[in-house]
């Protein structure tokens, strides 16, 4: 593997992590918009991009069958609209840091639930212990400026974060099984079907529970809201996937796995920067423990 190819792959992986990390702080960057508004805005942008790409390739690729469309609709609800709605609610109540670390354990849960038979449980214990210690330390520290003051709100936010974790972990496992069962469906084709389904779901969600269009347009932060919708829909959903595919093709699977940690680290960096403060010693220690735990778990899986 050449040095230039490796460097380009690492840069692409870090770029994907930087874009993914944005979704954790975006809900705190605008005011006057509900969790439904933020979720619908992001995925309407993603759906529009996917629909354009799907129309552009229509001559070369067939439309999904009814069972395929239903599968895309169900998984888009689980892994996109439902997951992100719960994440926005978690960030609203618990701030950015704790939900970020909770979601950051997804690679471990996916690995545990899909553990190969040759991997011994004892090899995973050091990584799991470090990760749990980091999470416990972060939860036990005073909550940042983005968190609600009431402890009941914080606890509710943690519950939302765990629910969003369950949604995306289930999506990862079900999506992987579906793709293996349907090898005739190309990965990019499936991504576009998911995007269109997600966009339609976001439109229905906004129509049922979102703020009226005049209310959205009257908000002083409407320019920032639109920019974040495009950045998290086009950038964090569509473009980040392309960058991750580039990294996956140029790097070994083990190195790609380690780069997943960049999503969590970028999210925490954005959060502390938005608050205009350095992490406390306890928060910094928690981040280090968490990162070491993820890396140890990935190493055990190699």
Image (cartoon, rainbow, N blue to C red):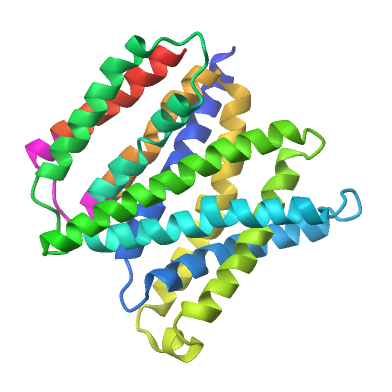
Tell me the residue at 29%/58% (across/down). 91
- Lateral position of residue 299 relative to residue 1, left or right: left
Range covered by the magenta-colored residues: 271-284
Tell me the residue at 9%/45% (across/down). 141
The x, y position of residue 38, in whole percent, is: 43, 68
Comparing 104 with 231, the one in front is: 104
Res 288 seen here: no
The x, y position of residue 184, in whole percent, is: 82, 36
Please determine whether, in this image, residue 247 is positioned above or below residue 6.
Answer: below
Tell me the residue at 33%/62% (across/down). 89
Among the 4 quarters of the image, the one containing residue 126:
top left
Comparing 280 with 104, the one in front is: 104
The x, y position of residue 88, in whole percent, is: 36, 61
The x, y position of residue 265, in whole percent, is: 31, 38
Please determine whether, in this image, residue 263 is positioned above or below residue 117.
Answer: below
Among the 4 quarters of the image, the one containing residue 249:
top right
Res 228 seen here: yes
Please determine whether, in this image, residue 78 is positioned above or below residue 27.
Answer: above
Q: Main SS type for the magenta part?
A: helix
Tell me the residue at 27%/45% (across/down). 268
Please determine whether, in this image, residue 221 is positioned above or below residue 28.
Answer: below
Comparing 217 with 110, the one in front is: 110
Is residue 251 covered in magenta? no
């Amino acid at each position: 593997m050449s040095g230039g190819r490796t460097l380009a792959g690492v840069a692409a992986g870090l770029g994907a992590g930087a874009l993914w990390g944005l979704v954790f702080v975006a809900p705190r960057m605008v005011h006057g918009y509900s969790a439904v508004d933020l979720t619908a805005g992001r995925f309407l942008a993603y759906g529009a991009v996917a629909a354009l790409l799907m129309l552009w390739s229509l001559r070369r690729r067939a439309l999904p069958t009814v069972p395929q469309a239903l599968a895309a609709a169900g998984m888009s609800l689980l892994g996109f609209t439902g997951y992100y709605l719960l994440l926005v609610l978690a960030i609203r109540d618990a701030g950015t840091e704790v939900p970020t670390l909770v979601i950051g354990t997804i690679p471990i849960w996916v690995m545990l639930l899909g553990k190969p038979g040759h991997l011994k449980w004892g090899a995973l214990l050091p990584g799991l212990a470090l990760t749990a210690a980091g999470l416990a330390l972060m939860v036990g520290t005073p909550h940042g400026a983005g968190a609600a003051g009431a402890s009941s709100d914080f606890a509710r936010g943690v519950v939302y974060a765990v629910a969003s974790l369950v949604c995306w972990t289930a999506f990862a496992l079900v999506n992987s099984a579906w793709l293996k069962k349907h090898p005739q469906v190309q990965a990019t084709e499936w991504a576009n079907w998911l995007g269109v389904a997600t966009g339609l779901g976001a439109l229905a969600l906004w129509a049922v529970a979102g703020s009226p269009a005049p209310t959205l347009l009257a908000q002083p932060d409407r320019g920032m809201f639109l920019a974040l919708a495009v950045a998290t829909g086009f950038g964090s959903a569509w473009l980040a996937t392309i960058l991750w595919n580039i990294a996956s093709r140029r790097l070994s699977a083990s190195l790609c796995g380690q780069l997943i940690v960049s999503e969590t680290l970028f999210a925490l960096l954005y959060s502390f920067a938005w608050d205009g403060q350095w992490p406390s010693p306890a928060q910094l220690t928690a981040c280090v423990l968490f990162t070491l735990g993820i890396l140890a778990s990935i190493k055990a899986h190699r």
